[in-house]
């Protein structure tokens, strides 16, 4: 009896989700994932939903937020800029973009400082590791590999 009632509840929930519309259902799922701090799943769900509905600005914004959460700031910045080109005046996206740009400016300052240290002492391998770590944090693996290869 418990098994049947569980199945009935699942069917009723599925019907409710379908009635609410796919975008609403996806947004509810995304909010749930964000609340539970399941960030990789949040990003992948937003990205896959966006692939199915590429003109949905809310899904694009969720994708940008997911990219920001996982540290892919340059990609998050590009998505935010695209959103604002296509739908200017989205306040939340503008705030996110400003925060991303602020963070990227700080990171670029750190990169310049480490590169200066490398120029001053090219034999210190730790500076190359620091530089690679910064790029890994940005999910910029090509630059990280180059930094390690420079050592």
Image: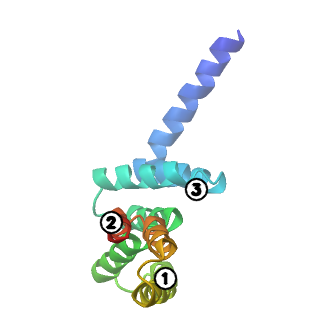
Q: Considering only vertical position in the picture, is 48 above or below 1? A: below
Closest to the observer, 126 or 97: 126
Q: Considering only vertical position in the picture, is 26 above or below 117? A: above
> Mark 1: which secondary structure?
helix
Q: Which residue is mark 3?
A: 31
CA gap, disc 3 to disc 2? 41 Å
Closest to the observer, 120 or 98: 120
Q: Which residue is mark 1?
A: 107
Closest to the observer, 126 or 131: 126
CA gap, disc 1 to disc 3? 29 Å
Q: Which residue is mark 2?
A: 149
**Residue 8 badge:** none
For the point 47% across and 71% down, the residue is: 125
CA gap, disc 1 to disc 2? 21 Å
Mark 1 or 3: the one toward you: 1
Q: Considering only vertical position in the picture, is 123 above or below 28? A: below
Residue 31 location, quadrant: bottom right
Mark 1 crowdedness (10 Å alpha carbons): few <14, some 14-19, many ≥20 = some
Locate residue 149 relative to residue 9 in the image: left or right: left
Mark 3 crowdedness (10 Å alpha carbons): few <14, some 14-19, many ≥20 = some
Closest to the observer, 139 or 40: 139
Which comes sooner in the sequence, label 1 or label 3?
3
Mark 3 or 2: the one toward you: 2
Q: Position of residue 80 (x, y in %)?
A: 38, 76
For the point 57% across and 34% down, the residue is: 13
State the residue lying farthest toward the front. Answer: 123
Q: Position of residue 63 (x, y in %)?
A: 42, 62
Is the C-beta separation of discs 3 and 2 under 8 Å?
A: no
């Amino acid at each position: 009896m418990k098994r049947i009632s569980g199945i009935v509840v699942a069917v009723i929930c599925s019907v409710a989700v379908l009635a609410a519309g796919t975008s609403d259902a996806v947004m509810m799922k995304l909010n749930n994932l964000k609340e539970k701090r399941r960030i990789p799943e949040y990003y992948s769900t937003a990205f896959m939903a966006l692939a199915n509905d590429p003109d949905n600005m809310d899904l694009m914004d969720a994708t940008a937020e997911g990219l920001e959460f996982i540290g892919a700031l340059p990609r998050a910045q590009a998505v935010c800029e695209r959103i604002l080109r296509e739908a200017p005046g989205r306040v939340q996206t503008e705030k996110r973009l400003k925060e991303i740009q602020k963070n990227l400016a700080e990171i670029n300052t750190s990169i310049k400082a480490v590169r200066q240290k490398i120029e001053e002492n090219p034999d210190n391998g730790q500076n190359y590791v620091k530089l690679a770590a910064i790029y890994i944090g940005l999910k910029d693996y090509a630059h990280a590999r180059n930094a390690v290869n420079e050592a």
